[in-house]
Image: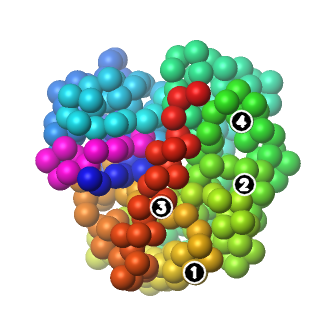
Amino acid sequence: MRSDCHMHMILDGIDWKAAISRHAIAPDEAFIHKTLKIYAEQGYTYLRDGGDRWNAGKKARELAPGYGITYRTPLSPLCKAGHYGKFIGETYENMKEYASHVKKLGAQGCDFIKIMISGLMDFDRFGVLTEESLPAEEIRELIHIAHEEGFSVMAHCNGARTAEAAAEAGVDSIEHGAYLDRDALAAMAENNTVWVPTLSTIGNLRGKGRFSEDAVARILDSALENCAAFAALGGLIAPGSDAGAWSVPHGCQTEETLLTEALGSQTADILEKGVIAVKTRFIRP
């Protein structure tokens, strides 16, 4: 029984704009059925969606039991106005508006809350993110508000200080997690933060000619080293491909291969603990 703890039903791994437009009027049930069938045929029984504001993930959750799949979704991710995430999520201007979004998503049946607290990796420049992350105090308040409403929190998060702040604030999972350092990894381990490193989004860029091959190789090496270091600290790691991201098709096997490269002979045991933590935490309150 396999799990993918970070995927996006609304995306297709090819063209995000075209993929989203497929669901713009209403979720494309034919596409969703086709995608769920791919996962079911590969033995997946658990999927955790990264969210979308067009209800593709919500429709997938409705249809997933027919394929023997447990499906969890935050519905729409939440991102601060002017920061990364608007292309797929809902924006808020201030904490009052954010809190209102959390309550609304709860009323609509979200399983958890997803927040966007950093930019992306710049795949042409090692060590560089596309924008500054949110301040630590804002991160703490975002997590606190969601927790007060009874929801677990998934955080799109890159950068050591951002991950450290999120972990210390009690975030339930960190997604991606580029450029972590020992202090960030230690904070995550001490606070039982689940890390979903989505290595496929880096590894699948190799040889594509879209980005600097040197930068991609260095980013991947850094992520693999951090996965091994986090595991050595007893940290919780869960598999998540970010399927739907560019060059990461649904059902892609890269994540398992890369995690095994990082974690070695203990991969299955390490990931089992991470998946159990995700399944336990990310349920509707």
Q: Which residue is mark 4?
A: 147
Q: Pointers 3 and 2 in contact (CB under 8 A)? A: no
Graded by Cα atoms within 10 Å as few (under 14), some (14 to 19) or many (20 or more), the crowding at tag 1 reads few
Which is nearer the N-term, disc 3 or disc 2?
2
Q: Is residue 146 left or right of residue 60?
A: right
- Where residue 250 sits: x, y (%)? 26, 50
The region drawn magenta spans 39-49
Which is nearer the N-term, disc 4 or disc 2?
4
Q: Which residue is mark 3?
A: 273
Give the Cα separation between the discs numbered 4 and 3.
23 Å
Of discs 4 and 2, which sits in the foreground? 4
Residue 217, quarter of picture: bottom left
Of discs 1 and 3, which sits in the foreground? 3
Of discs 2 and 1, which sits in the foreground? 1
Is the residue 276 above or below the residue 158 in the image?
above
Q: Which residue is mark 1?
A: 232
Give the Cα separation between the discs numbered 4 and 2.
13 Å
Residue located at (73% from left, 41% from top): 143
Residue 34 seen from this side: yes
Question: What number is the disc on residue 166?
Answer: 2
Quadrant holding the C terminus = top right
Q: Residue furthest right?
A: 137
Graded by Cα atoms within 10 Å as few (under 14), some (14 to 19) or many (20 or more), the crowding at tag 2 reads many
